[in-house]
Image (tube, rainbow, N blue to C red):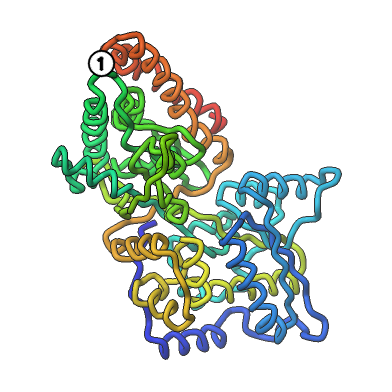
Amino acid sequence: MNMKLTGHLRRGGSLLCLVLALILTGCAGKSPLDPKDPVSLTVWHYYNGSQQAAFDALVEEFNDSVGRERGIYVQGYSQGSVSDLESAVRDAIGGKVGAEAMPDIFSSYADTAYEVEQAGALADLSAYLGGEELEQYVDSYIEEGRIASDGTLRIFPTAKSTEIMMLNKTDWDAFSDATGASLDALVTIEGVVETAKAYYEWTDGLTPGVPGDGKAFYGRDAMANYFIIGMQQQGVELFRVEGGEMTLNVPEDALRRLWENYYVPMVKGYFGAYGSFRSDDVKTGEILAYTGSTASAMYFPDQVELDSGAYPIDYLVLPAPILDGGQNYAVQQGAGMVVSKSDERHEYAAVEFLKWFTQTENNLRFGCVSGYLPVRKDAGSVQELDKVIEEQGLTVAPKTYDCLTAVFERMGETSLYTNKSFRNGSAARKVLEYHLADQAAADRAAVAAAAARGEALEDAAAPYVSDAAFESWYTGFCEALRAACGR
């Protein structure tokens, strides 16, 4: 599952590769399409705002060029959020009264796609892609899409992401100047915990007449990623899938380390989670930094808004912190596109559109707006990104550009990982997402209430961070995870 993005090919080489791919593809032969009798395709996705505008612009360009020449007309529809899209797909498959017909193409994460594949509703994309074409895509992205029992491709990689750390540089500078805090400490998760403790104590000390009002420094989105990647960094594959069967690995010592580096600082108030996303918490001044998706960079605020007024902030894009001494794994995530099983003309046309959408130039144009990473090997470099921006005259938000370039520059040192799909994978991920986070939020409220009554923080937190507290959580967590997995 390792991903090592290569440098981009020269423009002439890219053109030659494209020509060879068209000639040598396993799909070579007479096209089932007829420009005089065009195929109409419906695409469901979850893009909104600027992402939807960028997708719609590319669809329109396709329809006016390649689509017109080959007889393909594409219409895209946003279903709202990811969960809204998944519900619409399930309703369509189940034939729910009032549900729309299945789209020809829809965005899907691997767990959802696996469910749809089990229902026999996805097209085999391997039938429309030759080996030379597949070689142009990042290997781990293609492997993630091989969710069929026979290993054939069901998910077409279209846009991916990983995690980064975003930091409110303006308030960090004030903290750093006063305490000597260093960005070097933020390389590891343990360093983030220590820094968060120092920040809490520093902010508490700013109001000596009000004890116990220190502020949180850090938060994170996607707790499931914290578990999956945190275990991987310790050499443990949480969900090991072989031959279609999943083995659950939950060693106590590895999970103890994750508990100590998230739950404990949450309970003590060093970490925080208040709004829907941690970028919201930066905006309200509740935290200074968070780990989140590369696609979240565009939502990082330009100012902090307090009851007393607002002030502008600058930002830094940093690597997502890893466990001290751990292997340098980062999450591989992002929905791909799947094609509904139908007939040769529609399936063929759908793949033609997806191949066009993921051409280097087109994919980078979408990434410049969305913050998503391109999926082809020749597209993952700063040089290729800069070339597309210059040639297309694109205006790219600085935060999005800085995020993409930061990932490209470090990708050669990082191994991207995502677990293989398995039955009940969605249910298992929900346990990872909420089990510890919900308990941490509840227990933090109890500790804060005790502190408000005058109890010292360490005393108030002591019952919640003991060995017995961990054992209780660990037992409940394992039981919930096994139940979700059907064990």
Q: Give coordinates of residue 370: x percent, y percent.
A: 51, 61
Q: Give coordinates of residue 408: x percent, y percent.
A: 34, 65
Q: In the current view of this chain or complex, which residue is farthest to the right?
A: 97
Q: Give coordinates of residue 65: x percent, y percent.
A: 66, 84
Q: Quadrant of residue 248?
A: top left
Q: In which quarter of the image is residue 338?
A: bottom right
Is 362 above or below relative to 461? Answer: below
Q: What residue type is labelled 1?
A: Glu
**Label 1 secondary element:** helix
Report the residue marked by disc 1: 458
Relative to the observer, which residue lies in front, 19 or 46? 46
Left or right, 131 with reference to 273:
right
Left or right, 341 with reference to 283:
right
Q: Residue at x 69, y 64 (%)?
A: 76
Q: Which residue is drawn at 52% across and 68% down?
A: 366
Q: Residues within 10 Å of mark 1 (few under 14, many from 20)?
A: few
Can see residue 225?
Answer: no
Relative to the observer, which residue lies in front, 79 or 30? 79
